Image (tube, rainbow, N blue to C red):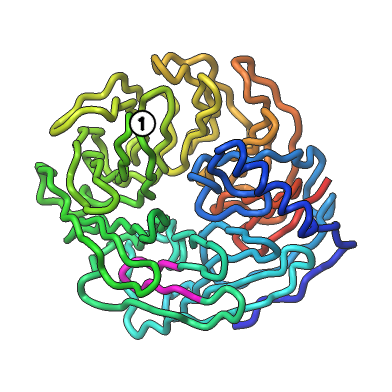
């Protein structure tokens, strides 16, 4: 399978080495631990927050401000990640037999790598068609890109050559996904973290990112109170943060959310967050962790306890089952699967507004840039609104196919992946 040809427009001027050195010098002096604007390193970007310090376009659509479009056959919902001039994502055949890692040139859209990572003789089957065999977003750093296909395989590739450095396809990293995998990996402290919440087994694992060897494995330690494996499933992506001097790996699951010590895997606390099929990436701020689950419920948890902890507040009003929320200042922004966007007071959970975007159903997570929210629908619509306590639509664009993947940002450009193509959209 070879991706289609690119439709190219004039190239933008990238940051020079001198610019980059000055950026890193400033960051070092200011003590701000962040990535440069050129890096969108994991699902939802730096720290999984879905935010970019960028002046993104407000006029866009099929053929409008599209610098390039690269057709992409297959069926895969993973989101793009970016490092320098490389855009990486995973791809798969619809039947799951062949699983790829793909790299595009960020300036031209040309395919730089199309690496067949795994050839699966007997892929797990799913009773539904909503998910794909390549829904887990990669994580990238200088010189390395890490890809996960859940129980079908995990690997590290040299991002320059595309050569596989290590891979895992063993019984330890296996579960029955039942409805296919979607949990994305993250990196922290030399480790790669993965969530395996299947119908048969549920665990969190940390791998040495250099070798792929298991550092620790934590089996979910709470009672699901059911023998129904489908209700034990989840698709969540973890997040690491430090609260009152204690580093925590927040690992959402069906029924509950666990906090673990990132280096040892020791259980710190458990919060009953209800539901099943958790897929949103938790957010942290104001001394709270915000978790939404696959049954349309959100909980705010104070992460300084031990054992079983209670939610500070919870709500079911217009909460997404699939996508993640954005924490911006004192507010939480999100879009429900039904297409209703909303704004909550982060400290209390009080709804400040709920408005229908008139763009159909949603699965992709929104992003934020310059106090503007970008929402991508399953119909191919992109709706831009204000990120303020008062709702206002700023722009509306339309693409030929729908969005399951979440947007990525490089410089002041959007990298968008629809079901059939990848785009670069500039101002």
Is residue 314 found inside the magenta-colored segment of the image? no
In the figure, is residue 353 to the left or right of 133? right
Residue carrying label 1: 289
Please, what secondary structure does the residue beneath circle 1 have? Answer: strand
Q: Position of residue 13 (x, y in %)?
A: 85, 57
Q: Quadrant of the C terminus?
A: top right
Quarter location, residue 133: bottom left
- Residue 391 lies, with reference to residue 420, above or below; the image says above
Q: Is residue 24 visible?
A: yes
In front of the other: 214 or 69: 214
Residue at (42% x, 22% y) in the render: 286
Residue at (34% x, 26% y) in the render: 300
Q: Position of residue 294 (x, y in %)?
A: 34, 41
In front of the other: 401 or 269: 269
Quarter location, residue 52: top right
Residue at (24% x, 58% y) in the render: 198
């Amino acid at each position: 399978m070879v991706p289609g040809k690119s439709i190219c427009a004039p190239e933008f001027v990238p940051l020079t080495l001198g610019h980059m050195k000055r950026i890193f010098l400033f960051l070092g002096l200011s003590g701000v631990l962040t990535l440069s604007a050129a890096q969108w390193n994991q699902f939802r970007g730096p720290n999984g927050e879905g935010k970019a310090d960028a002046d993104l376009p407000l006029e866009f659509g099929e053929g409008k401000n599209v610098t390039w479009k690269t057709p992409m056959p297959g069926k895969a919902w993973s989101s793009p990640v970016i490092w320098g001039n490389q855009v990486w994502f995973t791809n798969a055949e619809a039947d799951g037999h062949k699983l790829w890692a793909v790299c595009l040139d960020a300036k031209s859209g040309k395919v730089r790598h199309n690496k067949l990572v795994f050839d699966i003789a007997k892929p797990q089957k799913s009773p539904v068609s909503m998910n794909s065999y390549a829904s887990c977003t990669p994580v990238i750093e200088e010189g390395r890109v890490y890809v996960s296909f859940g129980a079908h395989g995990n690997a590290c590739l040299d991002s320059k050559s595309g050569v596989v450095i290590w891979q895992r396809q063993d019984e330890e990293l296996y579960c029955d996904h039942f409805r296919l995998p979607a949990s994305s990996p993250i990196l922290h402290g030399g480790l790669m973290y993965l969530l395996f919440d299947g119908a048969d087994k549920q665990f969190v694992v940390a791998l040495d990112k250099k070798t792929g060897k298991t550092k620790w494995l934590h089996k979910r330690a709470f009672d699901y109170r059911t023998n129904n494996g489908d209700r034990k499933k989840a698709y969540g992506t973890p997040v690491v943060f430090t609260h009152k001097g204690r580093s925590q790996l927040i690992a959402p699951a069906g029924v509950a959310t666990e906090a673990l010590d990132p280096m040892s895997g020791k259980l710190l606390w458990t919060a009953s967050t209800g539901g099943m099929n958790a897929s949103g990436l938790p957010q942290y701020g104001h001394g709270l962790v915000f978790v939404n689950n696959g049954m349309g419920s959100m909980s705010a948890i104070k992460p300084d306890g031990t054992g079983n902890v209670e939610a500070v507040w919870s709500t079911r009003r217009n909460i997404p089952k699939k996508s993640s929320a954005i924490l911006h200042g004192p507010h939480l922004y999100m879009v429900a699967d039904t297409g209703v966007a909303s704004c909550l007071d982060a400290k209390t959970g009080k709804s400040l507004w709920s408005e229908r975007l008139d763009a159909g159903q949603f699965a992709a997570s929104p992003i934020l840039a310059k106090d503007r929210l970008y929402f991508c629908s399953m119909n191919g619509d992109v709706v831009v609104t204000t990120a303020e306590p008062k709702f206002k639509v700023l722009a509306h664009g339309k693409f030929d196919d729908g969005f399951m993947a979440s947007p990525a940002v490089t410089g002041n450009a959007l990298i968008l992946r629809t079901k059939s193509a990848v785009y670069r959209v500039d101002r």
